[in-house]
Image (tube, grey):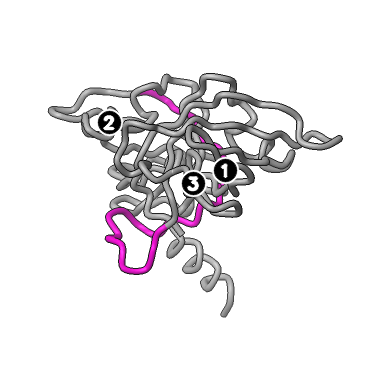
């Protein structure tokens, strides 16, 4: 489990085939100047790391990077299939019992890919708008929570399949939001509570 509070920006250093199929191994450089990742070399093999909202397993670790194997299914259902060497990746290590829950409960299970529609300055922040498929839009509500590329955010406006969130300068500086452009794809994870409420409503 994660909180959607990004603790560092990694950089994709290498992408190569993993096995004989379409799976890929990605090497992601660790943010060395960040206190939250100072002990990154001690990450255990098999540990979970949220990479732009996608929960992946560390299969190799060095003092400067960690490697993950990404299945063809994940590549086709998330933005990971668009990553290239040099791509910036939002990173978060798993929540520990007793840690502060600063965002909301995030599983790292991407529900779908949304599209950036645009950004508009609003006083001291920037309002970013996104579009998702109707199958996901039903789970997104004003003042509810949503994870976008692994970032826990509050929904401020909903219009059909479109919704908007406000990003403060700090969030833009420490996440990939500062790099987004209209038309870019983003990983979307809906709120876990909304998922289960919708499921319960299907039964009399």
Per the image, is 107 magenta?
yes
Q: Earlier in the sequence, mark 1 or mark 2?
A: 1
Question: Residue 178 versus residue 34: which sits nearer the camera?
Answer: 34
Q: Are marks 2 and 3 in contact (CB under 8 Å)?
A: no
Residue shown at 37% from the left, 42% from the top: 37
Per the image, is 101 magenta?
yes
Residue shown at 37% from the left, 37% from the top: 8
Q: Which residue is mark 1?
A: 112
| Rendered location of residue 193, percent (x, y) | 43, 65
| Rendered location of residue 4, percent (x, y) | 38, 49
Side of 48 where 18 appears, left or right? right
- Check the image and name the residue furthest to the left: 123
Question: Residue 40 versus residue 115: which sits nearer the camera?
Answer: 40
- Please name the predominant secondary structure of the magenta segment in the image: loop
Q: Earlier in the sequence, mark 1 or mark 3?
A: 3
* Disc 3: CA contacts within 10 A as few (<14), some (14-19) or many (>=20): many
Q: Which residue is mark 3?
A: 50
* Disc 1: CA contacts within 10 A as few (<14), some (14-19) or many (>=20): some
Q: Quadrant of the C terminus?
A: bottom right
| Rendered location of residue 21, percent (x, y) | 84, 36
Helix, strand, or loop for circle 3? strand
Q: Give the spatial CA distance, label 1 vs label 3.
A: 16 Å
Residue shown at 27% from the left, 35% from the top: 171
Helix, strand, or loop for circle 2? strand
Q: Which residue is mark 2?
A: 127
Which stretch appears magenta? 95-118
Of labels 1 and 3, the one closer to you: 3
Q: Give the spatial CA distance, label 2 vs label 3.
A: 24 Å
Q: Earlier in the sequence, mark 2 or mark 3?
A: 3
Q: Give the spatial CA distance, label 1 vs label 2.
A: 21 Å
């Amino acid at each position: 489990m994660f909180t959607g509070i990004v603790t560092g920006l990694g950089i994709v250093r290498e992408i190569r085939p993993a096995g004989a199929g379409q799976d890929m191994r990605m090497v992601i450089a660790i943010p060395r100047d960040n206190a939250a990742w100072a002990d990154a070399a001690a990450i255990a093999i098999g540990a979970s790391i949220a990479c732009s909202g996608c929960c992946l397993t560390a299969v190799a670790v060095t003092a400067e990077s960690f490697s993950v194997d990404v299945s063809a299914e994940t590549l086709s259902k998330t933005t990971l299939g668009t990553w290239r060497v040099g791509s910036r990746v939002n990173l978060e290590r798993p929540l520990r019992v007793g840690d502060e829950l600063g965002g909301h409960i995030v599983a790292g299970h991407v529900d779908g890919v949304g599209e950036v529609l645009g950004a508009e300055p609003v006083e001291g922040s920037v309002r970013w708008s996104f579009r998702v498929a109707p199958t996901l839009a039903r789970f997104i509500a004003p003042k509810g929570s949503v994870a976008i590329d692994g970032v826990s955010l509050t929904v401020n406006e909903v219009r059909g399949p479109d919704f908007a969130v406000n990003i403060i300068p700090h969030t833009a500086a420490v996440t990939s939001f500062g790099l987004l452009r209209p038309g870019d794809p983003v990983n979307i994870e809906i709120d876990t509570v909304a998922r289960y409420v919708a499921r319960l409503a299907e039964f009399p």
